[in-house]
């Protein structure tokens, strides 16, 4: 038992990074560690249970959804919920998935290009008004979208862009997600200046330096940006609700919401099924990109 | 460093003509890189903000030209009982859910930080809800869970408690949204975890050699050193909470009901602007929101002088 505790503590100090090594001078009672484990697992189960229950319920009959709180399906799995949900709206659900994917990819491209360019200028180049512009950029991170949504809507409707994806995508090509500009500025500041200065001395201009030196080095920051942009765009509801009013342009969020209105209380199975489908892309991105996500919020939050 | 760093300094000292030429080139490059941001800042952010300020003094329904009505919109806000209700709902939501959420985030970050096998596994489990929490799908789930025959009541029945339909009772509907926000404590928790890692272990070693207990260590070491991050999370989560929209919209079916108990300020603004097309009034509401969020942030920054401890 003692050796177990020993390895546990060692293992933990390994996980939590080198500065912690040898921190625990007093050896803790194994029972206390076990109790803490149990509490942490219990909270984890409570946290994740609703999601698991929804997953299981998406294969249940409507009656069973409302009578069963457990995780057993109760009877044979009702896969037809998925087919019913898929065909439950004006367009097949795949259409809305495709719409959301187009929006998300457009937004990712926009953020990657425009934010990295702005970040390079802020982090490395000297120019007049740099401090002022940087301060303005930081302030826009905190700006509620509601303050600008009305005039934006007016502008985009004048341009005839309502019921297209342009109002959602074009702003991303203009570095309006200042959060990512800031994230990349922080990252570029961590790249040794010698690297890009060496490139400059070798005769590279600013653009070559940016493309050949800075961009390849900031791949982790770009990955973080891409992942966050995907998740936030996929989950976004407010601006999609405003700009996408024709069913053919509905994104997953808007389609799901219209499903709620259309189905009322009668078809929770198909509704849950499509809810699950809508969460799958986010979940997959989370699985693949966890490392970058955690690092991303840690670097912006920790500094 | 050395050679290149020196060269850089030399470059700065180079005489007149060449320096300005180099600086000019650098400046031109900078503005090219910044061009998208500048266009976006003027066209998508600052410009619309000014237009929105102008519209807040007008009567505008999208079809006719905006009509200047002075401060009428703001006078109307003073007498708009629904708006007052929506402010009360929003303040309650922010002031209740953010402290609970951050307390949960901090407690679990500390628990996870102290020697646990499979830390990254637990961290993922706790973090996942904060990624999904703002989605329509989770709001749909919440609607079922807190309905009269929903999951929560089924669980409560199993232990012999008969509870009301949480989302259709005005006294509990907002509570379900508070729970939803608390459920997403994973994001601030990960930020806390990163902050806890930065605290040198020797502080704790020295303290325990001197006989300081856990609680004392927490108060005298963890809290001061973590205070900048607590502050950061507080500012961020308050701003986020003021803008919450999706959950209230989906759970209440867009109405803010029952009896306006989930009528967030943002939801009322949406109804005014995009339901009734009272764009002028909606703009003045948006500016009120900006002022409120700005005031909260300013007070936070001011108060931080008294409790946030900066190491450097």
Image (cartoon, rainbow, N blue to C red):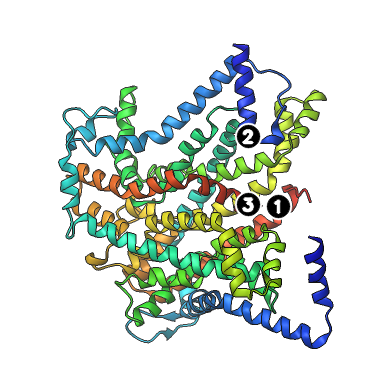
Res. A256 image quadrant: bottom left
Q: Where is residue A195 in the image (x, y as percent from the top left)?
A: 68, 62
Query: Do tags 1 and 2 sit on the same chain?
Result: no
Pick the front one: A208 or A269: A208
Above/below status of B281 relative to A100: below
Query: Do tags 2 and 3 sit on the same chain?
Result: no
The residues tagged by marks 2 and 3 sit, at their Cα atoms, a distance apart of 22 Å
Q: Name the residue under label 3.
A: B232
Q: Position of residue B35 (x, y in %)?
A: 55, 78
Q: Name the residue under label 2.
A: A16
Above/below status of B287 relative to A158: above
Res. B298 image quadrant: bottom right
Secondary structure found at label 1: helix
Secondary structure found at label 2: loop
The crowding category of the residue bearing disc 2, from other C-alpha atoms within 10 Å (few below 14, some 14 to 19, many at least 20), is many
Q: Mark 1 points at which residue?
A: B304
Label 3 marks a residue whose chain is B
Give the label, 2 or 3, closer to the camera: 2
Q: Where's the N terminus of chain B, which quadrant?
A: bottom right
Tell which residue pokes out farthest to the front in this image: A202
């Amino acid at each position: 038992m003692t050796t177990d505790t020993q390895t546990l503590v060692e293992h933990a100090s390994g996980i939590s990074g080198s500065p912690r090594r040898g921190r625990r001078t007093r050896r803790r009672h194994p029972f206390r560690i076990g109790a803490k484990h149990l509490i942490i697992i219990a909270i984890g189960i409570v946290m994740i249970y609703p999601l698991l229950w929804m997953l299981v319920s998406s294969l249940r009959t409507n009656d069973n959804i409302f009578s069963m709180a457990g995780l057993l399906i109760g009877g044979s799995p009702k896969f037809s919920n998925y087919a019913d949900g898929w065909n439950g709206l004006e367009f097949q659900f795949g259409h809305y998935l495709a719409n959301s994917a187009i929006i998300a990819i457009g937004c990712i491209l926009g953020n990657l290009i425009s934010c990295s360019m702005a970040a390079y200028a802020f982090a490395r180049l000297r120019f007049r008004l740099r401090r002022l512009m940087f301060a303005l950029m930081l302030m826009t991170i905190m700006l509620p979208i509601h303050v600008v949504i009305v005039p934006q809507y007016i502008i985009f409707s004048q341009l005839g862009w309502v019921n297209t994806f342009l109002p959602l995508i074009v702003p991303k090509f203009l570095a309006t997600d200042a959060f990512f500009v800031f994230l990349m500025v922080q990252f570029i500041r961590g790249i040794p200046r010698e690297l890009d200065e060496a490139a400059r001395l070798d005769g590279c201009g600013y653009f070559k330096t940016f493309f050949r030196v800075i961009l390849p080095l900031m791949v982790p920051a770009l990955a973080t940006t891409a992942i966050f942009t995907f998740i936030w765009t996929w989950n976004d509801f407010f601006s999609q609700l405003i700009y996408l009013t024709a069913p053919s342009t509905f994104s997953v969020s808007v389609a799901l919401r219209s499903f709620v209105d259309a189905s009322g209380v009668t078809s929770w199975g198909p509704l849950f099924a499509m809810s699950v489908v809508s969460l799958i892309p986010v979940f997959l991105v989370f699985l693949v990109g966890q490392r970058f996500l955690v690092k991303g919020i840690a670097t912006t939050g920790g500094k | 460093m050395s050679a290149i760093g020196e060269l850089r300094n030399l470059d700065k000292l180079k005489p007149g003509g060449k320096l300005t030429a180099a600086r000019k080139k650098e400046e031109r490059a900078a503005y090219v890189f910044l061009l998208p941001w500048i266009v976006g800042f003027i066209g998508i952010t600052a410009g619309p903000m000014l237009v929105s300020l102008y519209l807040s003094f007008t009567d505008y329904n999208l079809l006719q030209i905006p009509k200047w009505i002075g401060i009428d919109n703001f006078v109307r806000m003073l007498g708009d009982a629904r708006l007052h209700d929506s402010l009360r709902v929003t303040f309650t939501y922010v002031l209740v859910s953010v402290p609970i959420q951050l307390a949960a985030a901090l407690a679990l970050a500390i628990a996870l930080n102290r020697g646990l096998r499979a830390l990254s596994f637990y961290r993922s489990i706790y973090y996942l809800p904060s990624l999904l929490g703002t989605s329509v799908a989770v709001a749909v789930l919440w609607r079922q869970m807190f309905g009269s025959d929903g999951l929560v009541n089924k669980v409560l029945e199993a232990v012999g408690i008969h509870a009301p339909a949480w989302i259709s009772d005005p006294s509990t509907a907002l509570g379900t949204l508070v729970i939803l926000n608390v459920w997403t404590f994973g994001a601030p928790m990960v930020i806390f975890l990163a902050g806890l890692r930065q605290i040198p272990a020797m502080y704790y070693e020295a303290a325990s050699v001197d006989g300081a207990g856990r609680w004392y260590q927490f108060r005298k070491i963890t809290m001061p050193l973590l205070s900048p991050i607590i502050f950061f999370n507080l500012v961020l989560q308050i701003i986020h909470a003021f803008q919450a929209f999706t959950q209230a919209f989906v759970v209440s079916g867009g109405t803010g009901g029952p009896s306006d108990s989930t009528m967030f300020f943002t939801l009322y603004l949406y109804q005014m602007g995009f339901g009734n097309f009272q764009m002028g009034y909606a703009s003045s509401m948006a500016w009120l929101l900006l002022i409120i969020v700005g005031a909260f942030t300013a007070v936070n920054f001011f108060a931080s002088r008294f409790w946030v401890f900066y190491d450097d």
